[in-house]
Amino acid sequence: MTAPILAIAGYTVKEHVRNRVFQLVYLFMAVLVAGALVVSALAQDQRLRMMMDAGLAGMELIALIGILFVTVNLVREESESRSIYLLLSRPIERWQYIVGRYLGTLSAVGAGIVLMTLVHAASLLFFGWRPDALYAAALLCAFGKIAVMGGLALFLSLATTSTPSATAFTLFLWILGHFSGEIRFLVEKSTNPFVTALGWGVGAAAPDFAFFNIRDFMDAATMPGPEWYAWLAVYTLGYTAATLFLSSWIFSQREF
Amino acid sequence: MNKAVIRLSAATKIYRRSHLGKTTESVGVDGVSIEVPRGQVFGLLGLNGSGKTTTIKMLMGLLYATRGEVTLFGKTMPDPEALARVGYLPEAAYLNRYLTGRETIRLFATLGGIAAGDREDRVNAMVEKVGMSEWADKRIEEYSKGMVQRICIGQALVHDPDLLILDEPITGLDPLAINEIRNLILWLKSQGKTVFLSSHDISEVARVCDRIAILCAGKLARTAEASDFRENPDRLEEIFEETVRGTQRVGALSFG
């Protein structure tokens, strides 16, 4: 059961690495080096703070752009080029194709995050940074967000009829995901049943990025407890599994 | 016991398209019944739009029959167990251009269920058989049309299928390549394999097929045995013209 998934994930990684994902990584590296030159004029503590914040935010943004634009075209491109005909004419289930393509894309973007992290960490070390576990936790959160957004983008690419609409919906839900607390507050306080229903629906569909909020811990310089990590893992796996399940169902109805 | 490798029983495919709340229907194939026993080379003839590719896509599980039944090896399609015994060569070779020829054949060997221990030997042997040893480690995007066709043949045969389905296998090929495809079909027949092919080229079909069916506007208009045309290949052209005359969906060109 896993061999077809791994085979599909493997060729997906090769396709992305040979195609375009890593161009974004190189862009990040160039921007990081240029940024380091600019902030080198600042005092050391400010320098580190800026490099840390801008670097983590930049990595997350670039990984998000990467997974979004790759994933919304993941199945569509293969359908338009008709190379999907041969793949689906092999003894594989449709869900195996979806899971393989998703895992391959996530692995390629994950490899990009690792490369960016190496460059980022090296530049921080150059400015006198001492590695800490919070940095690793921040990277874990960024990867969790990317995993969730990849699943969502894949689902929306199959549920909508065009790449622009899938991209727009994914970005819209990504933005809403940062306001999950506010949406919950609105649902609790509102007496209007329409607003309550709408808020509940949007809150259920959009990813809840409150689970990935490492910023409060970084500001307080404290490590999150094990239950925080457990909820992070449960939420990431649960949301991703739900989007992959729905994607597989839609894809199983497709004809080519 | 069901001895037919391929069985289409009153298979019908109706394409439905919805736009702005209005649904339009068009018939791809209409009530087609065909049986192909083991070891036979079966040719499907018809004009453009007659339903040949639709029939083949139903056999491959890429399209679902609206009515009727489509079975391969006694299994209703799409069925992974049946697909494991089928090789498919589509009308144009649709391969992922970022992979090399060897990676492509390896991917399809894996998806075809060849055990890991056996895989590399099978892949290397197939690369050699299709005459691509020198080019196998270059990407598909660097290949000529003939080279892509060879890799496509390799992916169709690497898992040693019992049934080969060829959709317009000689369209757009040069005379040497056509000769190679003809020899391939005859070799498959000598190995006891079943071959199902669609084509416009009546003379080629007359040379290799044991039985033919002619589709007109989605309906099975006629079948003929090799004994009806093998001695005189022009006879098949006459049979074809008699059958399809007046069924074109567009008018004739009327220049000069």
Image (cartoon, coloured by chain):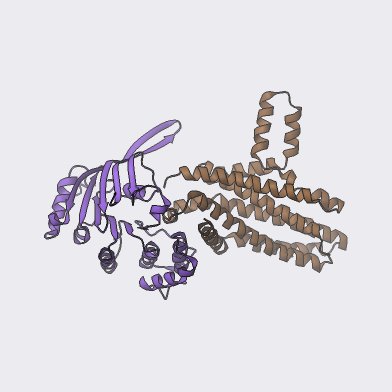
Chain colours: A brown, B purple
Which residue is drawn at the image coordinates 19% and 48% (left, top)? B223
Q: On the rendered structure, is B142 left or right of B146?
A: right
Residue B186: % across, % down: 25, 65
Which residue is drawn at the image coordinates 24% and 46% (left, top)? B215
Q: On the rendered structure, is A100 left or right of B32?
A: right
Total marks placed:
0
Say if A253 sits above or below B130 in the image. Answer: above
Q: On the rendered structure, is B195 left or right of A97?
A: left
Which residue is drawn at the image coordinates 38% and 68% (left, top)? B147
Q: On the rendered structure, is B31 left or right of B87?
A: left
Depth check: give the residue in front, B11 or A200: B11
Which residue is drawn at the image coordinates 68% and 40% (left, top)? A176
Depth check: give the residue in front, B24 or B219: B219
Residue B138 in view of the camera? no
Residue A149: % across, % down: 64, 48
Depth check: give the residue in front, B52 or B244: B52
Say if B239 sits above or below A35 in the image. Answer: above
Q: Residue furthest bottom?
A: B134
Residue A18: % across, % down: 55, 64
Residue A181 in view of the camera? yes
Q: What is the quadrant of residue B95 in the picture?
A: bottom left
Residue B21: % across, % down: 45, 30
Q: What is the quadrant of residue B133 in the picture?
A: bottom left
Q: Residue furthest front?
A: B1
